[in-house]
Image: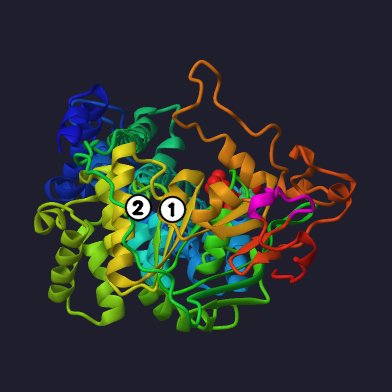
Amino acid sequence: MSRWLRVLRTPLGISAVLLLTALIALAIFGPMLWSDNASAVETDAIQEGPSADHLLGTDALGRDIFYRVLVATRLSVGLALLATLIGVVIGTLLGTAPSVLPRRTGRLVTAAVNIAVAFPGLLLALFFAVIFGVGTTGAVLAIGLATAPSFARLTQTLSASVAGRDYVAAARVAGVGRLRLLTRHVLPNIGEPLVVNATIGAGAALLAFAGLSFLGIGVQAPSYDWGRLLGEGLSRIYINPAAALGPGVAVVLAGLAFNLFGEMVATVVGERTPTPRIGAPPEPARPSTASAPAAGAPVLAVEDLRVSFPTPTGWLTPVRGVSFVVHPGEAVGVVGESGSGKTLTALAASRLVEEPGVVTAERLDFDGVPLLSTPERELRGLLGRSLAMVFQDPTTSFNPTRRMGRQLAEVAEEHQGLSRRDAIARTVEKLTSVRVPAARRRAHQYPHEFSGGMRQRAMIAMGLMSTPKLVVADEPTTSLDVTVQRQVLRLLAQVRADTEAAIVLISHDITVVSQTCDRVLVMYAGRIVEDLPASDLHSRAQHPYTRALLAVVPDLDTDREQPLGVIPGRPPEPSRIPEGCAFANRCPLATDVCRTEDPQLLRVTDRHRVACWNPVVDEAEVEQPIGERAEVQG
Ligand SMILES: Nc1ncnc2c1ncn2[C@@H]1O[C@H](COP(=O)(O)OP(=O)(O)OP(=O)(O)O)[C@@H](O)[C@H]1O
């Protein structure tokens, strides 16, 4: 509220409010007060110039032009607003249709909008005016339809920017349908810029309307708006210029009122920044108490997973044949440098890779259900109940326009059929279980009122609203400070112990993964290059890349005078994966074969796989001769 007051006190705010109030007052009271004066015919005062009796002179029937301009405010502003409303409604429908319609139909709509946007608005309005016929209805429809394409384009662009946010992905994982996703999560977050644009658009519609009436294809006699009065006045501009200037000034002032108001709203909206909060006090970390991985059917089975994207020069495949399984209750860490494909692997396993991305796999089963061949509608329930996602940035994981409690409760309402009241009770229970203090009060707060660590815990609570079998945490602690990181990791370990959910923890930080997980998958350039128990990481890692990742982690013996260690070179771009082993040009042990043939991920022991032609094997650690590493896993 204070933001509004502050902007209202600026010259922009004052002029916008004054002009708009005057305009609205005129539109409401003008016809009531001055209709009679405006329609009174004075045969002895025909086509007179300005005088004390008639400030802007009179028209061909001796009617007072000044009063007619005042009375015309209602029709001029009313029709412009009606046309804007039509444009906004149709534009928003067209702009959001591609998100809910089948892909092909959606593309057609987008193409049609793009073509329509390319035509100048007034030309379109003239075109529609001819189709709908001369008159007020035709002009309103014409201007409304001519405004719609640019609005649709704006809505599409804004929706696309919101669709990529984590809270939309979270809602999709929670099984929220497309339409609901649109109405609950996308539209509320693009509402403000749309309103700002609509306000400014109303000014443009007013001008367009005046233009059509001026040309004689808008409002028809005996009705009159500013455009019509302008047209009539223009025919006598050399005799009585005030007759044309009056309605002209009215159009300019009304357009200015709408534009200034739009600018004022834009200034208020642009000022919005969430209030920063300070994180909760640190708590000491405890080692994981989770049980050893259970045997039996895996909760996630991935075989030869590939994720590709089309580019102008061909397909790009950032994930190139990844195979692994995650057993119930197991914690699997995925490490690797930026761009190695960790996130895409997790997204593919949650069916969250967006078109035009293409996911293929020999097998991609979640809880025994093949994700690639099961219809989305059927999967929604399964994933919503059994899969929880925790994203990197807790700031973008929640819809900023909705209270936290509602966002969590939605999951329970959707999947457990709980009533609103029970869902809220469950929300409070879950927020308490992840140690959000004063959970009942907090449930009524908005995301920006939570600290970063608390938001991340609330995200975990959201995953726990059902009983997840798998929690996928993608860099859940990257944006948090060190002490809060510990709390979140500890919480994940506790969730695992309490619910027996499996956890896939994606991280840049090999130390975090080794402390939190049972098993570590090391990824490089879209492939798993090593898969080994976390307890063996420091003693038995064989891939030179894994060793290099471990070597650059500073420890207590690291010389602080020296710069921190780095792995020389850079990982290859997905578009430039070299022949042979992708790590060869950075590998100190690379030989000729490494540069020509890509090594397979082969089994070293039952729990250890490595993809390397020259694995680093300390004599004392050898369990099997390298020659026996023959079984191909993926
Ligand atoms: N929608 C997309 N279109 C094209 N390329 C993409 C797309 N999404 C990801 N990529 C590319 O795929 C590669 C792997 O991305 P991914 O996000 O999985 O890496 P990551 O290992 O999780 O990295 P980070 O740790 O930085 O998140 C990157 O090179 C990225 O540029």
Is residue 304 in sight in this rendering?
A: yes
Quarter-of-image position of residue 243: top left
> Which residue is located at x 48 percent, y 73 percent?
327
57 vs 405: above or below: above
CA distance for labels 2 and 1: 11 Å
Is residue 481 in sight in this rendering?
A: no
Q: Nearer the viewer, mark 2 or mark 1?
A: 1
**Stretch of the chain drawn in magenta:** 612-621
- What is the number of callouts on the image? 2
104 vs 473: above or below: below
Label 2 sits on residue: 189
Label 1 sits on residue: 165
> Which residue is located at x 74 percent, y 45 percent?
583
Of 549 and 138, the residue lying toward us: 549
Is residue 620 a member of the stretch shown in magenta?
A: yes
Task: Please indicate whether residue 397 sits to the left or right of residue 435 in the image.
Answer: right
- Where does the image place residue 356, in percent across and percent down from the top left? 64, 62
Of 630 and 460, the residue lying toward us: 630
Of 334 and 210, the residue lying toward us: 334
